[in-house]
Image (spheres, rainbow, N blue to C red):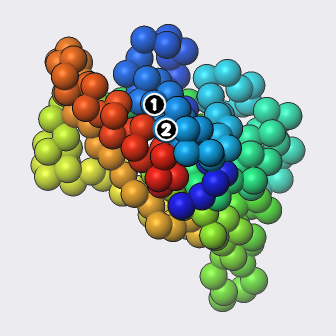
């Protein structure tokens, strides 16, 4: 449980009516009520290019927005990442942000020959909240939550972030007000717990 939380809002649509944005807001509200300090990185508001080569990923200077985001991530003890499932994965804008922010020198240190990469973000935990139109059970069991597992293992875990918890929220377009309110209450509770 951390007193310093960074919420990464990965929904590319800035419309405040998006359920994923309401979930992140409820999480932040719960965290603030418990006396935790919360910073928000709204990916859609940032200015950064898409990386197009390994050379850019390893050596290009990050934009000012990415440097500020990295400073917030370094400050945090806990990250909460919110995004909708698009075409079976995270939206391209969020993936581009993660490629920019989680670079060598910040998230990992290059390995010496025949050695493992050094995980520079160890000591932080994370929660991933994914919303989707399909039933969550279908995503977990039929599709095996492959994109979520990739984010956990290949990005966050690779950088040393652990433990990583998840919430998969399906049928968000069904318009069930009681079900939505239940999830908003759950996010407030998780924010209060700082996990």
Pointer 2: what residue?
30
Residue 97 in the image: x percent, y percent? Answer: 63, 38
Assign a secondary structure to mark 1: helix
Q: State whether residue 30 appears in this view.
A: yes
Residue at the image position 68 percent from the left and 38 percent from the top: 39
Along the viewing direction, whichever of 46 and 117 lies nearer the viewer: 46
Q: CA distance from mark 2 to mark 1?
A: 6 Å
Q: Is residue 148 above or below residue 10?
A: below
| Left or right of 115, for residue 128 | left
Q: Residue at x 51, y 67 (%)?
A: 162
Q: Which residue is mark 1?
A: 26
How far from the left and from the top, in percent, is residue 79?
Answer: 57, 50
- Say if mark 2 contacts mark 1, CB within 8 Å: yes
Name the residue: 86% across, 44% down. Answer: 61
Task: Name the side, left or right, on which 135 lies relative to 66.
Answer: left
The image quadrant that residue 74 belongs to is bottom right
Q: Can you give x and y, in whole percent of width and height, for residue 45 in the image?
A: 67, 21
């Amino acid at each position: 449980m951390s007193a310093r939380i960074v919420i990464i809002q990965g929904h590319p649509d800035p419309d405040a009516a998006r359920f994923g944005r309401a979930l992140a807001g409820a999480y932040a509200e719960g965290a603030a009520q418990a006396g935790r300090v919360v910073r928000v990185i709204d990916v859609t508001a940032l200015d950064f290019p898409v990386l197009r080569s390994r050379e850019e990923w390893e050596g290009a200077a990050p934009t000012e927005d990415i440097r500020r985001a990295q400073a917030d991530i370094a400050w945090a003890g806990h990250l909460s990442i919110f995004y909708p499932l698009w075409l079976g994965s995270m939206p391209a804008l969020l993936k581009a942000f993660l490629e920019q922010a989680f670079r060598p020198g910040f998230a990992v240190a290059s390995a010496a020959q025949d050695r493992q990469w050094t995980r520079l973000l160890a000591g932080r935990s994370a929660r991933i909240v994914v919303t989707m139109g399909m039933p969550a059970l279908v995503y977990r069991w039929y599709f095996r939550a492959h994109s979520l597992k990739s984010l956990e293992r290949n990005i966050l875990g690779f950088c040393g972030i652990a433990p990583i918890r998840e919430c998969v929220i399906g049928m968000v377009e069904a318009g069930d007000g009681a079900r939505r309110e239940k999830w908003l209450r759950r996010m407030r509770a998780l924010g209060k717990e700082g996990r």
